[in-house]
Image (cartoon, rainbow, N blue to C red):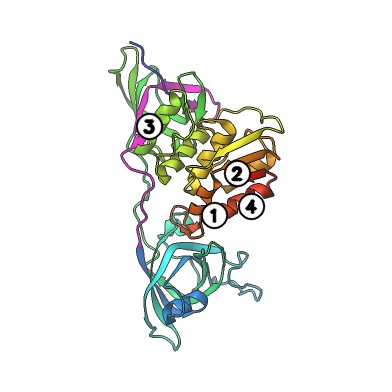
Amino acid sequence: MSVPLRWRLLDNETGATVTDCTDIDGLFVDRVFPVEPLYERYTLVSCAPSGPLLAAINGTGPAWFGNFGIEGAHVPGQPVSESCEPGCMGCYGILEELLDVRVVGHRPAADGPDLFDIELEGHRRDDDNNLGGSVAPAVFGYRLIAWSSVNGSVEEPSAGECRDIAGLFHERPEIWPPGPPLTLLGCRPGLSGSIDAELAHVRIDGTIHKVGWGQRVSGRVVATRPSTLDDALVDVTLNAQIPEPMAANERQLWDMWRSGGPTEPNLWAELDRSDRYLWVRAAAVHRIYAPDKPAGTVYHLDGRYVTDYDAFFCAIGEAVNGPGGWFGGDLFWLHENAATGDGGATPGFHMIWHNSEVARTHLVPGFDRKSWMPAVTFDDLVRYLIEDGVQLELR
């Protein structure tokens, strides 16, 4: 029998084909995107609060104030710069960021008047700083910067200083751990030794789309057996894991793109916001590169389903490049495509945004618990498009 070979491994150095296979056990895992963050309790020890933090504990301001940037107040053995103001990235930089922070309690500190031990609830932005947040940096105390307010603006007021932050630096389980050991199912025979390869998705028409660095395959063949899929193929087990495996709710999208992609617009409309994000990501990977359409082309954005940030990118991608099209998935790529081209439309293009009132109603100021930043509003998107030279007509 004949089986489709839908995945290709490309050597990282030469780009040559390492092997083709029908499926990969360990690429899609039984988890759903996005992973809900783990909220933690932190204590600002011997804190001299100011700004919104002081308002939160004396009752003149809200207990919730968005995100916290944490700077080192002083590094041992280094002089303190007189020009180093709170929020100055040129001093010791933002060491950590706490997200969706709320004050949940406070008490007088033991080591000085007008100092408090302040209890916070929030979660740490997942990054590599300070060994993934497991080891405290070598600093004497911390400056606190509050940002990301509910009114949609990004501000950086000082929130005070503290001697220590209890509960912040410790080992944590990985938010999205590597997938299980890989088995390449239904491979062409002859694969052996060590492999360091990029992964590419092969569509039915033979088009090859590289997936991304987070899905690379790097390891050694440890077992080979005849495949039950085809007598001429083998299954290959590797001592490797996908660094960033794809979520279970992505597989159906990839199957659709493999079969040719969306055949009509707005198939994403029934998805929730998280799956709309995955739709845009799949559209980016499977993008068909072509010259920008001629200047003077008018694009029609169907705004009936633009009820969130990711829906906007689904809709504008299809407005410019047809069903399943991509025209960016964030503000950086929106700017790149609109202002400099190479996204399918010649810069300075005319776009008619139909049913724009839907987005005006839904994309409003607030705190976005997907990006963990102030929400991008309808007015923001309109301003960005116009500043990038788009002749935008709202209907």
Q: Is mark 1 on a helix, strand or loop?
A: loop
Q: Do the residues labelled 3 and 1 touch (CB within 8 Å)?
A: no
Q: Do the residues labelled 4 and 1 touch (CB within 8 Å)?
A: no
Left or right of 202: which side holds 29?
left
Instruction: Name the mark nearer the viewer: 2 or 4.
Output: 4
Instruction: Answer above or below: position of 56 versus 292.
Output: below
Q: What's the residue at 42%, 60% (across, down)?
A: 124
**Most distant residue in the top direction:** 1
Q: What's the residue at 36%, 49% (across, down)?
A: 35
Cα–Cα span, label 3 and label 4: 35 Å
- Labelled disc at residue 377: 1
From the image, tell me which residue sits under label 2.
334
Instruction: Name the mark nearer the viewer: 3 or 4.
Output: 4
Where residue 188 sits: x, y (%)?
39, 17
Mark closer to the chain start, 3 or 1: 3
Where residue 375 sits: x, y (%)?
51, 56
Cα–Cα span, label 3 and label 1: 30 Å
Q: Which amino acid does label 4 sit on?
A: Arg
Mark closer to the chain start, 3 or 4: 3
Q: Name the foreground residue: 221 vs 4.
A: 4
Q: Name the foreground residue: 198 vs 274.
A: 274
Left or right of 338: which side holds 135?
left
Q: What residue type is labelled 2?
A: Leu
From the image, tell me which residue sits under label 3.
252
Q: Does the magenta stretch include residue 73?
A: no
Mark closer to the chain start, 1 or 2: 2
Q: Which amino acid does label 3 sit on?
A: Gln
